[in-house]
Amino acid sequence: HSRGMKKTMLPALLLLSACGTSASPQAEPGTLTLHPRRGKEETTVAWKASQSAVIICDMWDTHTCAGAARRVTAMAPRLNAFVAEARRRGVLIVHAPSDVTKFYDGTPARALAKNAPEAAAATDFKWRRLDPARESALPVDDSDWCDCTPKCEIKKIEESRKWPWTRQIASIDILPGDALSDQGKEIHNLFVQRGITNVLLTGVHTNMCVLGRSFGIRQQVMLGRTVALVRDLTDCLYDPRKPPHVPHDEGTSLLVGHIEKYWCPSVPSSDLRP
């Protein structure tokens, strides 16, 4: 660019900076250059790595649905590579494998989350169900979401509440400096302590835990954080034999579109490349 063009661009860059983001094709040291998308609109923003976190939601070692477990196993190496690059750049990594945090009792990652000092919050922490005041019904029928043939015996497992998962899937590394918690309040305490204002959500499942957990998208948005879903590092629970009768991956895409419309933008994992 010529010197004159740089002068012309300067006011726009300052305006974006005042809004908490900056638009620059090259990331400055300690920043993440992201391309958040809402529908057909895509922008370029810069997040400070030191003010950013990745939450890995419910990437368990197995699942009540064999198909869901296979998709998690396939996704985990890609998610681990994404997390490794985020960690290298100074982003806080939070592992959030619900129901199985006892497996990690006594570990540094668990202690990091548990020991963060109590922080005030503008709202309570709970499972956040679909909010009809803010969003439409989900675009897929997930009332019977196992897509296996024959179907897995999920109802019996739910009735007994003997969940098969025991830990986070082992192919996702938990390294020094990472945190581990399935409690929204603990994670909030840690974020306040660390000055975390930007959150990338990854993991499963898009239509359930990623949206609804006490650390999930709805909760983080309600807390006023800048949130984005990593759209190719998530997966839904949906049986294509149910409406709208589209392939599984398309069902996930529809849910990503729902989140973009009502809650937060999505970004591709390619935004963090070594």
Image: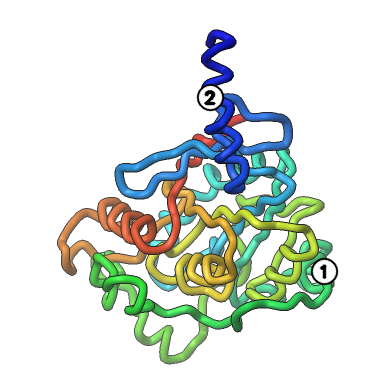
**Rendered view: 132 above or below 23:** below
Please report whichever mark, 1 or 2, sits nearer to the chain's N-terminal start.
2
Q: Which mark is residue 137?
A: none
As drawn, the label of residue 9 is 2
Q: Residue furthest bottom?
A: 159
Residue drawn at point x = 52 percent, y = 66 percent: 221
Residue 67 in sight in this render: no
Label 1, label 2: how far apart the Cα atoms are: 46 Å
Q: Quadrant of residue 142?
A: bottom left
Relative to 49, 82 lies left or right: left
Give the residue type that dot 1 points to: Ala
- Say left or right for 258 vs 201: left
Q: Nearer the viewer, residue 198 or 159?
A: 198
Q: Which residue is mark 1?
A: 111
Q: Secondary structure at mark 1?
A: helix
- Left or right: residue 171 versus residue 179 is left
Q: Residue at x 52, y 36 (%)?
A: 271
**At 57% across and 29% down in the image, what residue appears?**
24
Residue 46: horizontal and vertical position, in percent?
60, 39
What's the amino acid at mark 2? Answer: Met
Q: Residue at the spot x=63%, y=74% of the render?
A: 184
Q: Residues within 10 Å of mark 2 (few under 14, many from 20)?
A: few
Nearer the camera: disc 1 or disc 2: 2
* Residue 22 place in picture, x, y as percent: 58, 37
Q: Is residue 17 above or below residue 165?
A: above
Secondary structure under badge 2? helix
